[in-house]
Amino acid sequence: MNKIIIAIDGFSSTGKSTIAKQLAIKLNYIYVDTGAMYRAVTYFALENDFIGDDFFHSKKLIQNLDKVSITFRFNDIKGFAEVYLNGINIESDIRTLRVSQFVSPVATLSEVRRMLVKQQQLMGQYKGIVMDGRDIGTVVFPEAELKIFMTASAETRAKRRYKELLERGHNLNYEDVLENVTTRDRIDSTREDSPLVKANDAIEIDNSELTIEEQLDTIINLASHNISK
């Protein structure tokens, strides 16, 4: 069967990863969470005091990027691939609001983006891959056969993120989550290197009122059309 590259881009907390994971399972494709890769670099920066509430030693981070090794290992029990930084499982560590607060500034660094884009392109060289992020359809795989751009209102996305963090045991305010979502939108959309934009040939899906099943059905139908070409 003909295999394709499926690029899913969009704003934070639109459920890109959830959809991409399930889509990959349905199609028996490889799933790559590029957002987790940027979160891993951000976690590395936080752990090494390269970034904080009132400072960002970007040059020090860039100088130490050769010490960053990011891999994915499939967890048979959980049913998805978890992120490892230098051989250590950091899947739960990178999903905190603390990491979310700093991931956008880290992602603006061209050196970080070049390093990760190169890794991502290697992962997709044999196709049969679902990759989600901010610039997959515009920078990483501009030739992808199917490009999806996911969006939803900031309030809807903040509510989803707030619920997710509460379920993970984090104690926080909804207003802080909403502020984080809107701030990330602004930074992601205005950065100089690979800003978040919808590719000209991407299909936009506003999932504010859609269930996961409805989103999956829509994208699988689109994928089936491209696979059969």
Image: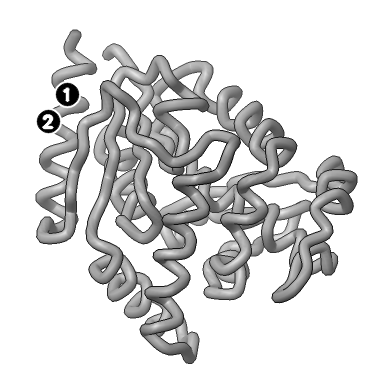
Displayed quadrant of residue 174: bottom left
**What residue is disc 1 on?**
224
Rendered location of residue 66, percent (x, y): 85, 41
Q: Is 93 situated above or below 219? A: below
**What residue is disc 2 on?**
221
Rendered location of residue 60, percent (x, y): 88, 53
What type is the residue that disc 2 sits on? Asn
- State the SS at label 1: helix
Dot 1, crowdedness within 10 Å: few (<14), some or many (≥20)?
few
Q: Which mark is residue 43?
A: none
Displayed quadrant of residue 28: top left
Check the image and tell me how it is coloured. Answer: one colour
What type is the residue that disc 1 sits on? Ser
Q: On the rendered structure, is 120 left or right of 224?
A: right
- Kindly indicate whether the residue at mark 2 contacts the one at mark 1 (C-beta within 8 angstroms): yes
Q: Is 117 situated above or below 103? A: above
Q: On the rendered structure, is 178 left or right of 76?
A: left
Query: For this rendering, which residue is in front, 89 or 143?
Result: 143
Rendered location of residue 123, percent (x, y): 56, 27
Q: Quarter holding the N terminus?
A: top left
Rendered residue at 27%/45% (across/down) = 150
Rendered residue at 31%/56% (across/down) = 14
